[in-house]
Amino acid sequence: MRIIGSFTRELTLAAIDGLAKYYEIVESKIQTAKEEERVHIREKIKSMRLDLEGELVEWDIARQEHEMTFDMLLPNYFRYSCMVLLYLVVENKLKEFCEVAQSVKNNLPPPPQPKHGIVNEYKKYLSNTVGLFSKRWDAVRDLNKIRNCIVHASGKVKDSSDKEYLRRLANSEKGIIISGTREQLREDLRPLYLEDDMLMLKPEYCREIIQKMRDLFEELCDALSLSKLAIEESPDSTP
């Protein structure tokens, strides 16, 4: 029995599928924790044996803190971290993919070893040197701008070097909102304890961009003819 095909496709797609699973699990756990904490708050206020007015005051204060934590802080922090992790995976897998491309194509120069503009250099190598093209590079550029805003400006769009790009992206992409804008008020009417001009990511965007990165690598694997792994049994093998 022998294995046929390349591990590159399987390992690359497995990494992104694992990240997608991680995203769904943690997103779900945040919602579970939100409901559990709401019950805990109500029980705690009941135990204080206040009159109705006092109970309502305590609940209003606790509700605002609860919403700040579970409707804004925790989801946005988690989604920020997930996008940064996704970009790291994309960088790493593009590097590996460039190396594999050189190994299966004849007479190609070695892939770049960039210190800056890493993904763009890998894209140029795959497009210009290897001859692999994809329409999904636009989604990688979007992810790069979002990642840079998170890492270099703590999510503050006004402090990002790509602020105009991000504003256009928020106007065109569902699931990307900039706090304090009409779009944010229209999309989410719950009170958000967030300063204006902060990048906000909603679940639909996170899911969509993870899928787009998977589609990119699947497309590159197909273009390079990296087949799925298969098991071939020897003629004399026994069950």
Image (cartoon, grey):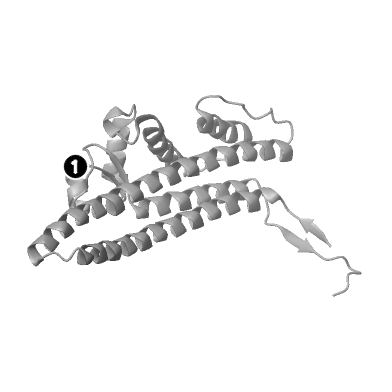
In this view, 236 is above or below 3: below
Instruction: Classify residue 187 as left or right of residue 7.
Output: left
Instruction: Classify residue 182 as left or right of residue 20.
Output: left
Give the x, y percent position of residue 36.
Answer: 33, 64
As rendered, which of 97 and 161 lies closer to the eye? 161
Give the x, y percent position of residue 148.
Answer: 40, 33
Q: Residue at x 54, y 51 (%)?
A: 16
As rendered, which of 238 and 57 lies closer to the eye? 57
In this view, 234 is above or below 133: below
Label 1 element class: loop
Binning the other alpha carbons within 10 Å of mark 1 as few (below 14), some (14 to 19) or many (20 upward) gives few
Amino acid tagged 1:
Thr
Instruction: Classify residue 221 as left or right of residue 43.
Output: right
Q: Residue furthest top?
A: 115
Q: Residue furthest right?
A: 236
| Circle 1 residue | 181
Give the x, y percent position of residue 117.
Answer: 50, 27
Q: Which image quarter: residue 83?
A: top left
